[in-house]
Amino acid sequence: MLTLSIILTVVVVASFFIIRNLLKQTEKLEDIRTEYENFITKQSEAINTCNQRLKSLDDKNIFYADDEIGFFFKEVQKIQEALNEFTLK
């Protein structure tokens, strides 16, 4: 009976430390996930803001119609369209 009590005590203590360590790891991963989600949200907001600003700059198609500036503006729009695929929907 004494042997069984000792074995049970060792198992309970070992289980306590294992569960405690797993809990700490889970909390660290949750913190990392939260930071990652915040980063993604901020990047998505920045891309959306840039997209709105780009559209408001050329709402009268002044840049788009100009030959020299129009080429550059079209390229910037292509870059913006590529970035739009990375926003949160």
Image (tube, rainbow, N blue to C red):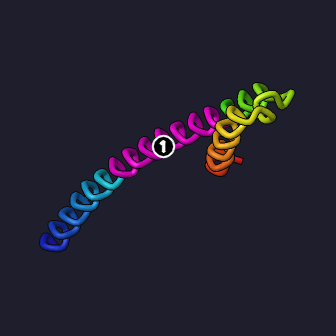
Number of numbered discs on residues:
1
Nearer to us in this view, 70 or 78? 70
Q: Amino acid at mark 1?
A: Tyr
Q: Is residue 87 visible?
A: no
Q: Is residue 20 left or right of residue 59?
A: left
User: Magenta residues?
Assistant: 23-47
Residue 14 appears in the figure: yes
Q: Residue at x 30, y 51 (%)?
A: 20
Front one among 69 and 75: 69
Examine the structure image and report whether residue 39 is included in the region drawn in magenta: yes
Q: Which residue is mark 1?
A: 36
**87 shown above or below 53:** below
In depth, the one of 66 and 44 nearer the eye is: 66
Which is more toward the observer, 40 or 51? 51
Numbered disc 1: secondary structure: helix
Locate residue 42, reporting x and y percent. Answer: 57, 34
Q: Position of residue 11 (x, y in %)?
A: 23, 66
Instruction: Name the spot of residue 17 as percent of width and height, x first.
Output: 24, 54
Question: At 28% across and 61% down in the image, what residue appears?
Answer: 15
Can you name the residue that lies furthest to the right here?
60
**In the image, is 10 to the left or to the right of 15?**
left
**Label 1 crowd bin: few (<14), some (14–19), many (20+), radius 10 Å:** few
Q: Looking at the magenta stretch, what is its main secondary structure?
A: helix
19 displayed left or right of 72 = left
For the N terminus, give its image quadrant. Answer: bottom left
Q: Residue at x 47, y 46 (%)?
A: 33
Look at the image and say whether residue 88 sits in the magenta stretch.
no
Q: Residue at x 22, y 57 (%)?
A: 13
Q: Is residue 30 above or below residue 45?
A: below
